[in-house]
Every structure is written in structure tokens, then in C-alpha cells.
């Protein structure tokens, strides 16, 4: 069991593949530390640290946070982690993968593979409750009739934006799949199915069905 907690994993998959959902289940089941670039950036900004102020200035100017700056944030999180880490959202590019390789020994790379049409259906069917922040899906996680009318369709979840995000993923992130496959590190999991079905597939493929 302790070996599972000491593993360093990378989570890969297209937008809408279910990475966020499965990340929560993996860290709960196996005791790994969730290294999410989005969460780390937001937390650092909210902490008003010197690094956070630097990130805030970049974001406020409408610029993307550089690989070097993102890695600074990740490194401080990694150094304080007692258990293994689950990297979610990093690396996204071959350059980021090279940076991570110098700092951390990765045991496995988990690739959640989902058909493009399913990805588009998952993204475009999402709806946000502006009062609670909860996210629903019109088909897979439908809201109750009482709140249905107040739900909104986020700009990020429109077909056009989803298609653009998918194109960026194909260009920048998909090359990582071949990279890690060539190193014998890639574990491919069929992401088509319910969250619980995919969770079990991950347990079977990566952890021999074991949950801590």
C-alpha cells in the first residue's frame, strides 16, 4: 500500500476527458498529492506572496504564465510533499515534460483516452449554477427542474471554444503520449463510460484493482 502512496503520476487526456473527476478519486483512493497547475496558480495569487504578485501581474496583463514561472510554483509544492504526486495540467508540452524530468522521477503516465465526439458532447452539455458554483451536465448529471432555468452555458463550454481547445491539445499535448509510450511509461485507460466505470478501469490498469 505504501508503494502506491509514493508513486509520481502524470494525468493526461483531452479537455472533457474527465481528468478533474478522476484526479479527485485517485488522490482519495491512493493518498497522492494533487499537483494541479490551475489550483496552485490561484492559491499563490490569493496568498499575496512575492511569487504570487509576480503571477498576478502576468495574468492581469492578459499574458500566459511562462513555463519557468509555472515550474517555480510546482517545485515549491513538490518539495513540501511527503507522499507521491499526481500531476494534473503539467506537463502540457514537450518543453514542460523536459523540465519536470529534471526534477522528479515519474513512475507512470495515465492517459485517459476518450473519443472526440464524446469529448465534445461532455463539454458542450455542461451547465453552471451561478448561485452555488456547481456544474451539471444536461445528460450525464442533469439538474433538478427547480434550478434548471437559472443555469448558464459558460463561454468555455461552447462548441467553438471546445473545438479550439481540442485543437490546441492535439498540437501541444498529444505529442506527450508518444513520448511516454516510447519510454514504456504510458498506461492507456478507456475513458468512455461513467466516472465510476473509468475509476475502476484505472484501478485495474494501474493499481491491480487495489484501493487504499
Image (cartoon, grey):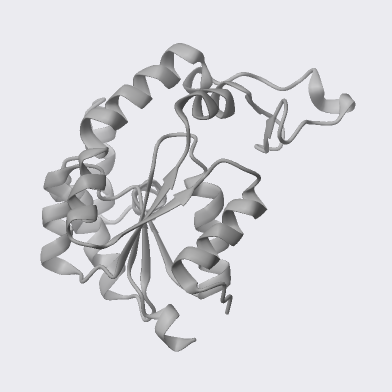
Task: Locate residue 114, reporting x and y percent.
Answer: 47, 37
Tell me the residue at 19%/57% (across/down). 72
Compared with 94, 61 (above or below) is above
Task: Locate residue 95, reporting x and y percent.
Answer: 11, 46
Q: Locate residue 140: give its quadrant.
A: top right
Tell me the residue at 19%/42% (across/down). 93
| Residue sitting nearer the eye, 57 or 187 | 187
Task: Locate residue 191, reporting x and y percent.
Answer: 52, 45
Task: Locate residue 199, reporting x and y percent.
Answer: 58, 57
Tell me the residue at 49%/35% (across/down). 16
Compared with 51, 32 (above or below) is below
Question: With 82 as the anchor, is 123 left or right in this view?
Answer: right
Q: Going by the picture, which residue comes out furthest to the right?
A: 146
Q: If the image is split into quadrants, where does the C terminus sit? A: bottom right
| Residue sitting nearer the eye, 135 or 3 | 3
Tell me the residue at 47%/64% (across/down). 205
Q: Locate residue 166: give its quadrant.
A: top left
| Residue sitting nearer the eye, 138 or 79 | 138
Amino acid at each position: 500500500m505504501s508503494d502506491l502512496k509514493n508513486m509520481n503520476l502524470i494525468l493526461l487526456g483531452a479537455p472533457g476527458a474527465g481528468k478533474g473527476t478522476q484526479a479527485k478519486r485517485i488522490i482519495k483512493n491512493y493518498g497522492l498529492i494533487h499537483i494541479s497547475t490551475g489550483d496552485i496558480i490561484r492559491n499563490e495569487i490569493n496568498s499575496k506572496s512575492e511569487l504570487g504578485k509576480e503571477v498576478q501581474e502576468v495574468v492581469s496583463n492578459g499574458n500566459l504564465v511562462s513555463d519557468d514561472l509555472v515550474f517555480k510554483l510546482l517545485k515549491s509544492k513538490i518539495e513540501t510533499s511527503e507522499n507521491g504526486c499526481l500531476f494534473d495540467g503539467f506537463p502540457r508540452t514537450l518543453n514542460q515534460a523536459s523540465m519536470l524530468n529534471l526534477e522528479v522521477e515519474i513512475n507512470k503516465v495515465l492517459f485517459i483516452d476518450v473519443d472526440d465526439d464524446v469529448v465534445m458532447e461532455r463539454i458542450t452539455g455542461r451547465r453552471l449554477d451561478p448561485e452555488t458554483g456547481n456544474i451539471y451536465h444536461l445528460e450525464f448529471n442533469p439538474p433538478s427542474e427547480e434550478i434548471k432555468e437559472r443555469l448558464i452555458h459558460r463561454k468555455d463550454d461552447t462548441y467553438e471554444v471546445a473545438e479550439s481547445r481540442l485543437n490546441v491539445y492535439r498540437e501541444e499535448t498529444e505529442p506527450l503520449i508518444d513520448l511516454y509510450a516510447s519510454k514504456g511509461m504510458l498506461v492507456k485507460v478507456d475513458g468512455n463510460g461513467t466516472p465510476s466505470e473509468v475509476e475502476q478501469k484505472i484501478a485495474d490498469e494501474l493499481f491491480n484493482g487495489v484501493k487504499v
